[in-house]
Image (cartoon, helix red, strand yellow):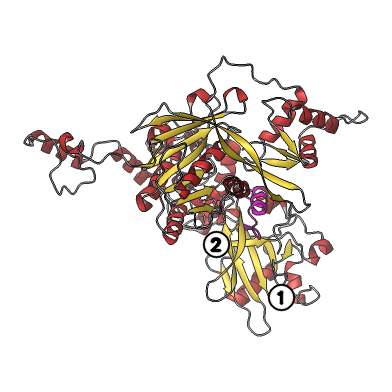
Amino acid sequence: MAGPTPGLAVPSLLRDLPGWLCWRYERIEGSGKAIKVPYYANGGRRYGRQGDARDRASLVPLERALERAKARGMDGVGLAMLADWGVTALDFDACVDAHGHLPAELEALVCDTYAEYSPSGKGVRAFVKGALGDRKSRAIADRYGVETFTASGFVTVTGNPLYTVDLFDTGDVVAPVSPKLRAFCDARFGPQSSSPSDPDDFMAGHEPTLGLSEDEIKALLADLDPSMGRDDWIRVGMALHHETEGDGFDLWDEWSSDGEQYPGSDQLQAQWDSFTRRQATGRQVTMASVIKMAREAREAQNPSERLEKLAEKVQVAEPSASYATPPGYPGRFPFVAASDYMMREPPEWIIKGVLPRADLGVLYGASGSGKSFAVLDMALAVARGADWRERPVKQGAVLYVAAEGGGGVASRVRAYAIDKGLSLDGVPLGIMNAVPNFLIEEDITAVVEAMAAAGPTDLVVVDTFAQVTPGANENSGEDMGLALRHARAIRDATGAMVLLVHHSGKDAARGARGWSGIRAAADVEFEVMRPDEGQVRVLRVSKQKDGRDDLSWGFTLEPVVVGLDRDGEEMSSLVVRDATVPVAQKPTAKRRLGAWEQVVMDAIGLLEPSVTSMSLDKLLDYVVGTVPAPEEGARDIRRQSVMRAVRSLQKGEDAPLMLEHGVVQFCA
């Protein structure tokens, strides 16, 4: 398979499921066998438990999966199979003959529902409504293999329909499990005992209700935070559904509406309705679980007995001459006396006076400020051990996590090497093009494992922080705090300083975007800015725990030819050139944009941050596509208007666009 099919025509029932991911072939070491390995759309490999809160948060709609699969060069997309979907995928292996046809028996089983060829073209995938379980029967002799997926694993989806789809017009049909299909599965696997014959049938659970009144239920809910994790929130809903026999939706809706994750009544109702099936096909969740959760929540709000006992111990403790924990103190937070502390070694520097050998740093700037170029210039100086701005550099290995535009980073590194007239062979700079999720512990563990395999690391640059925290609320201390803890975990495990590249907020004067705790957590913070939108940009130290925070350096970005494209035309990237910090001047008026110029810039703003250039023809087509077509009979002047706007946006020192050899470049 050459890659995912753009658009991927599959039934709307499947297309609308928020459970899609990417996959690619990977070979098993020592055997040469290729297997299909699932990856989340954010680039991280799929780990952990099927369908837990972390897993669900990383799954995406189909179009997003297709987009990321194409961008990352994956082999295809797939659907994670969760019980919530109420769908079973059937995988028939080695069943297609040389003419692309199936055995008559198999054709009769799938003719009434959507079915497609597998990536190899030798198998068939079909989808039906209903629970057939997760079972497998391998191919034996002349008998094809069969596997069913209802609540485990993932299935590849090709969008290459079986001939029966056109023949019986089932392109948008996911049919219920038919009696003949169920009989076939029972014959192949044995009778199914773990699932009901129809997932839409309600089967009363064996667990009895507790007979709680509405007031008693409300009192229990009052002790619980509706912004709790998704798994617990679902458990509360299922317990309410069980206790009220499906009539307590208003209780769940009213309580949930105060939570950060509240999706609205309509979506909540759909989730509520799904509990009928989930309670029928799995272990009952009762109000006993909610009672336990409420009790634990109340206990967490009161001082523990241990804390009370420690308070008594503090009151009778003997004073010490030197206020410090004694030698060998086993606790997690020992401390030393000031007289000893002041004799500690001074802080070490990676770049003297600029980049400390600390835990965490942040470098931020507005889009187009040149922050990615500035941080890469700094990282390459560290990897080479070359002075940076006439300041000594301690050479060290650098890992650059290219989470935002790996292809662009390749051109930038090549431009740097060409500009400096050097080879980077033996220079310890590693590029990680896969995108780890800093909200997921498994991804952080995998990053550390990769670092351990490569050798000691001194600096980790993450470009950008937003790309490694997909779906996170940037203003949430919970989400951002988790990501920062994981960044520090990399430091704790490897000793490498972590430098996060971040975006400015809407008000640049207020610093980096999102939660204020990011700045508080940083040992050093840099800002990259472009005063008055001029050619000279500025990198300044905006925070330094153990050094000066009034340092600044000017730089410009100059084009360097890095090679030829397939058409023989020159390709270029940008490199950092030292410049004098511009003298502060009175603010000048921001470039005023005409109506069509604003349309062009708004359209560019919707692109992925990794897109730094586009051919002129492609840009014109893209921008025109964002503007509604004129009314019938009216002249369509969209393309001419966009072309004039693009030409205008190339003029002046503050021009946001640059056209070279038919390619329009935007600064990263």
Q: In this rendering, would 650 be left or right of 482?
A: right
Front one among 135 and 626: 626
Question: Front-most of 310 and 331?
Answer: 331
Q: Quadrant of the N terminus?
A: bottom right
Q: Position of residue 16 (x, y in %)?
A: 67, 48
The magenta-colored residue range is 64-79
Q: Which residue is mark 1?
A: 95
Would you say 50 lies left or right of 179 here?
left
In the depicted structure, whether residue 11 falls above or below residue 224: below
Above or below residue 163? Residue 431 is: above
**Numbered label tally:** 2
Q: Is residue 105 magenta?
A: no
The residue type indicated by label 1 comes to Cys
**Badges 2 and 1: C-beta atoms under 8 Å apart?**
no
How far is the residue under mark 2 from the one under mark 1? 23 Å
Q: Residue furthest top?
A: 586
Q: Is residue 75 magenta?
A: yes
Q: Residues within 10 Å of mark 2 (few under 14, many from 20)?
A: some
Q: Is residue 303 left or right of residue 360?
A: left
x, y percentage for residue 234? 48, 46
The answer to whether residue 464 is seen in the rendering is no
Q: Which residue is at 71% across, 75% downward?
A: 95
- The residue where tag 2 is placed is 152
| Label 1 crowd (10 A; few <14 / some 14-19 / many >=20) | many
In the rendered image of this protein, does residue 354 appear above or below residue 135?
above
Lower position in the chain sequence, tag 2 or tag 1: 1
- Element marked by disc 2: loop
Q: Amino acid at mark 2?
A: Ser
